Amino acid sequence: MDDKAILIVDDVELNRAILSELFHSSYRIFEAANGRQALEVLREHRDEIAVVLLDIIMPVMDGYEVLENMNREKWLVRLPVVLITAENSDTASLRSYDLGVADIINKPFNPGIVKRRVGNIIELYQHKAHLETLVDKQVKALEQQALKLNQANAFMIEALSSVVEFRSSESGRHIKRIRFTTRLLLEALAVRHPKYGLTPLTMDRISLAASMHDIGKIAIPDSVLNKPGKLTAEEFEIMKTHTLKGCELLQSLNYSPNETFYRYCYDICRSHHERWDGRGYPDGLAGARIPIWAQVVSLADVYDALTSERAYKRSYSHQEAVDMILGGECGAFNPELLEVFVAEAPRLQKDPHGLSEAQAFAEATTPFDPFAEEAAERAAARDAEVLSARTLWLLEREREKYRIVAELSGDIVFSYDMGADVLEFSEKYHTLFGRDTRVPHTRERLTATDLIHDEDRSLIDARLGGLTPQYPRCRLELRLRTRSGRYEWFEVYTHALWDVDAGYECVGYIGKLANIHERKAEASILRERAHTDALTRVANRPYAEERITAALRNDSGTRAALLFLDLDDFKSINDRFGHPVGDRVLCCLAGEIRARVRESDVVGRLGGDEFVVFLRNVSSEKDVARKAEELCNLNCATLCADLADEAPVTSCSVGIAMSPEDGVDYADLMARADNALYQAKARGKRRYAFYSSAGGDAKELHPAAAAG
């Protein structure tokens, strides 16, 4: 076990227990349930703690307040903080980096990845502290002994360069690749262009000095250096200062400015971002004004940056990198140098070292450890240990809480593991559907099952396929087959789970099912009441207008007829027989109208004794006339048996407007059908008339025709 400790700060005990399990075999563990407790632990045990694992949202004092306090105390200079939180907004991330966190890990997390990332940060800060101590000792020794810095030059270059690369989350092999590529290009340049006077000793010195090219990044704030996304213009200006910061650092190392090696280091550090056309920085040098050794390192750095994976980009292939450099996408380079680069490009495809990142870091900063492999095996064995009794108890408690909440809510809770292809439901699923609560081989079985209504299957695929890390939730309504064998409506809430560390890969879903069948039925009844005339049960005036308008829009280009019906002498029926009989006559009439038209046609009551009938897709006016004649002859005395002897003799008058001839919208057709009805009633009862803009004679239906 390491002498150092880890402080875990989270208000959820289960979260603390899980993190403790990851690290307890390698580090001593301190725990805090809120920010105030965390600060108390830090004041007492700060020198023992290697890293703080911090949540943001906590009672008493949140994670941001903890960071602000640590900044005021200047603890963050040597003590790294890793946020492990479910808060994953860009605003929260930027605020956290601005406050000085070393890394952010989003929940839910992969335990193995958390362990590696936290371990790397601990190692980085330990090496950083170790190197700072070494630098202090070296500077004091040089001041006391008046020795030149080159007595420890090789070690300092390797160590300082390595810590810069690891601090900026780049590979530890970057330094060695830069040196290899620089040496390769120098050797070829010496052969093809002797004018540069590159001797073997000169090339050795330049290759070693190449390690110092990014030493100035040690002065760049973590919030800029380790930012995972694109830098703002202000942040990029800060990043650009690493060239000058590196020169300032070199000047502080007591080199004699006349020494050749110092000149190589200084020129490379300052000018490796200059470009042949003068569009580089910091000095805007162009052409031969840029030292040739800085030009070579610049090209080597660009090639390695393109072919290496970084937090903010993928790695490009060797050929893509070559094409981008030759195409000028990375700035302009010396044509003679590009000629050499093209000739030597095939040799760059193979990594000359083949070192892992950890090996490269160890080689650059620490002596060889013969027990390193054995220690790694022991660490791997520790990873395989089972969870402690405490963690198992907490997990079981959470599972029981989850089960109770699911039962109390009355909903069916489910979870789906995409990797295992297993879908699991709460117990109520078995009660309602009579099926197993665990569904292995889910994708295959759901394709064949009758659980989901056939018409709803495509809806599931479409909605789940549209989920993203930014919009991970969806709600849909499905018909599912219950134990009774009938399909009932369910509301399904689904939340997708994403593995942030695996490039936002969807790893599963959680959600719940709620039976809304009765609610849907009630809504249907309410909707019907809102759309239906309370007396006659046909469409009311607003809904009839809505349906006719929709039909005119959807059937554009086809012929239709709007019939305006009026019951003849209805007032006298009410006066003679009373309103109850009048109401029964209206109901009888509405039922008979509905029985004589198609289901796709529209029947509605406009009010009083007035009705509207909309006939869709009619073939001719002759067919409409026959239908109008049939409606004119409706007699409740013979059709409504329940009225018996007290039923009055009834008839209707009808006005007709045709679409598209007389209009293509509801208002125009109603106005013209009303005009036609007026013409029909002006000539007596039981008649119909088509609208005529000239006010022509109505087509008549005589009572004798009805009797015959």
Image (cartoon, rainbow, N blue to C red):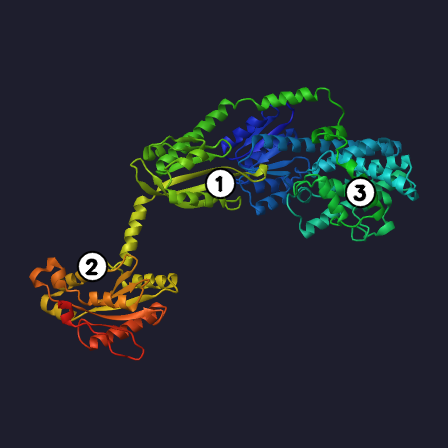
Indicate which disc, 2 or 3, sits on the residue closer to the N terminus.
Answer: 3
- In the shown orientation, is residue 462 left or right of residue 266? left
Front-most of 651 and 325? Answer: 651
417 displayed left or right of 363: left
Is residue 248 visible to the viewer in this orientation of the structure?
Answer: no
In front: label 1 or label 3: 3
Could you tell me the amino acid type at mark 2? Gly
- Residue 195, horizontal then vertical, whole percent: 92, 44
Asked whether residue 440 is in view, the answer is yes
Q: Position of residue 502 (x, y in %)?
A: 58, 37
Q: Residue at x 13, y 67 (%)?
A: 707
Report the residue marked by disc 2.
591
According to the picture, the residue beneath numbered tag 3 turns out to be 342
Label 1 vs label 2: CA separation?
Answer: 52 Å
Element at badge 2? helix
In-image side of 259 versus 557 (left or right): right
